Image (cartoon, grey):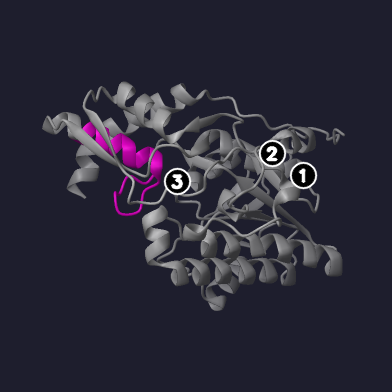
Amino acid sequence: MRTTWTDRPDYWKQRRVVVTGGAGFLGSFVVARLRTRGAEVFVPRKQDYDLVQLDAVRAVLAEAQPACVIHLAARVGGIGANREHPAGFFYDNLMMGAQLLHEAWRQGVEKFVAIGTVCAYPKHTPVPFREDDLWNGYPEETNAPYGLAKKMLLVQAQAYRQEYGYNGIFLLPVNLYGPGDNFDPASSHVIPALIRKCLEARERGEGEIVVWGDGSPTREFLYVDDAAEGIVLASERYGGPEPVNLGSAFEISIRDLVDTIARLTGFEGRIVWDTSKPNGQPRRKLDVSRAEAAFGFRSSTTFEDGLRRTIEWYRQQQPALAAR
């Protein structure tokens, strides 16, 4: 059933918003969209506010006096980073979220927008992933500590709504990609890692690249600027207790993804599959019908267009990134 809403062009005008992680990949796009709509945005920088620490959380809210908090800050990484630092990923994400939501409620912030992760879904969720399946099993083991720490924000938001009537919402974006992504090979996700591998192999004249797993898993990817629009729309229009997926409704196998990136980057060498490395979750594809019904969000960027923009951005930034 479609939820009705009324567009208010001046909704964000001079509305004060804290965007944690606002200087990061997704956050920079969210901040840009909010400011275009007239919001007054406060972005706490990590060097000034360590949001794992309660005093820093309290200081941010006291200084900004926001009407809304959009919590994007997270400790994130690919499969390798999650396997090496499960305790750190769990603790940092849990403490940031729990303390920030609690203090937002305590200090009278009108709305809290919690950003979860597709990693919170059970490993063998029926495809497409529906929000109602979120608790029907344990997440994929390599990123379960991160996924469960983020999922606690849903539990907390629903508990605070039940006991205090607090307006906290929980969004579940699928894997993101786009300009400004993390291209560090030690911690990057699959798309930036593959773009970098293909471009560097081509420049060096290398005849092959090595990719983790066997290429059989499937993934859904959402262009970062589309994700930002979805978050802003939900922040404005959605006020329900149920979690909401944000995705593109486009599923692709890792094998086809590698072939596509190789073609778009001009790499013509051999793809070597390292099957001693983990595949991760077998399939990921979201049911995105709730987002469209609840607040009118649909992604608008085709996958190849998004990849071309991402590759072009990385090519332009490559000299500076390499020097860094």
Residue at the disc numbered 2: 233
Residue at the disc numbered 3: 25
Residue 16 location, x and y as percent?
A: 65, 53
**Figure check: 181 above or below 277:** above
Q: Which residues are magenta?
A: 180-200
Disc 1 versus disc 3: distance between alpha carbons? 23 Å
* Farthest-out residue, left: 205
Where is the N terminus found, in terms of image quarters? top right
Q: Is residue 236 magenta?
A: no
Label 3: which secondary element: helix
Q: Answer with mark 3 or mark 2, whichever residue precedes in sequence.
A: 3
Label 1: which secondary element: loop
Q: Amino acid at mark 2?
A: Leu
Q: Amino acid at mark 1?
A: Tyr
Discs 1, 2 touching: Cβ within 8 Å: yes
Seen from the viewer's position, the closer of residues 154 and 86 is 86
- Residue 37 found in image quarter: top right
Mark linked to residue 95: none
CA neighbours of label 3 inside 10 A, class few (<14), some (14 to 19), many (20+): some
Seen from the viewer's position, the closer of residues 117 and 143 is 143
